[in-house]
Amino acid sequence: MDGVYRERAHLVAHLAAAYPSAIGYHDPDEPDWAVVIIELPTGQASWHVSPDDMDLFAHVQRSETNTWDGHSTEEKYARIDAHTRALAQKES
């Protein structure tokens, strides 16, 4: 499972380089895992980041406050899908 988290972390780190983002330790249920929050044009998206993958996020601004907007996993992926469609339309 670690390999899957590492692969996802690479993609999330890429998104965090392309869009405004911040990372910090804000989830009391997972205190050892940082949370990266990315502000997409269609809304916020966030992921937990394994301590083993923090090296991929050196470029992301650190935050001491929680800026999570309360989105669910379903909302997160709906926002990503909407942004993907918008980007694809720009390309055609």
Image: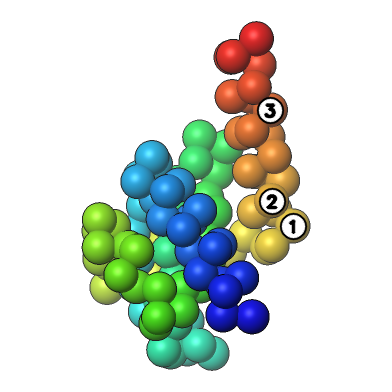
Q: CA distance from mark 2 to mark 1?
A: 5 Å
Disc 3 marks a residue whose amino acid type is: Arg
Tell me whether circle 1 and circle 3 mark residues in contact (CB < 8 Å).
no
The residues tagged by marks 3 and 2 sit, at their Cα atoms, a distance apart of: 12 Å
Left or right: residue 3 versus residue 22 is right
Residue at the spot of label 1: 74
| Residue 44 as seen in the image, left or right of residue 24 | right
| Residue at mark 3 | 85
Residue 24 in picture, x, y percent from top left: 34, 72
Sequence-wise, the earlier of marks 1 and 3 is 1
**Tag 2 near tag 1, CB within 8 Å:** yes
Which quarter shows the N terminus? Answer: bottom right
What is the x, y in percent for residue 23?
Answer: 35, 66
The answer to which of 46 and 64 lies nearer the viewer is 46
Query: Relative to residue 52, is residue 57 depicted above or below?
Result: above
Identify which amino acid the numbered label 2 is placed on: Tyr
Front-most of residues 66 and 10: 10
Occupied quadrant, residue 81: top right
Disc 1 versus disc 3: nearer the observer: 3
Image mark for residue 77: 2
Q: Secondary structure at mark 1?
A: helix
Q: In this image, 82 relative to 54: left or right?
A: right
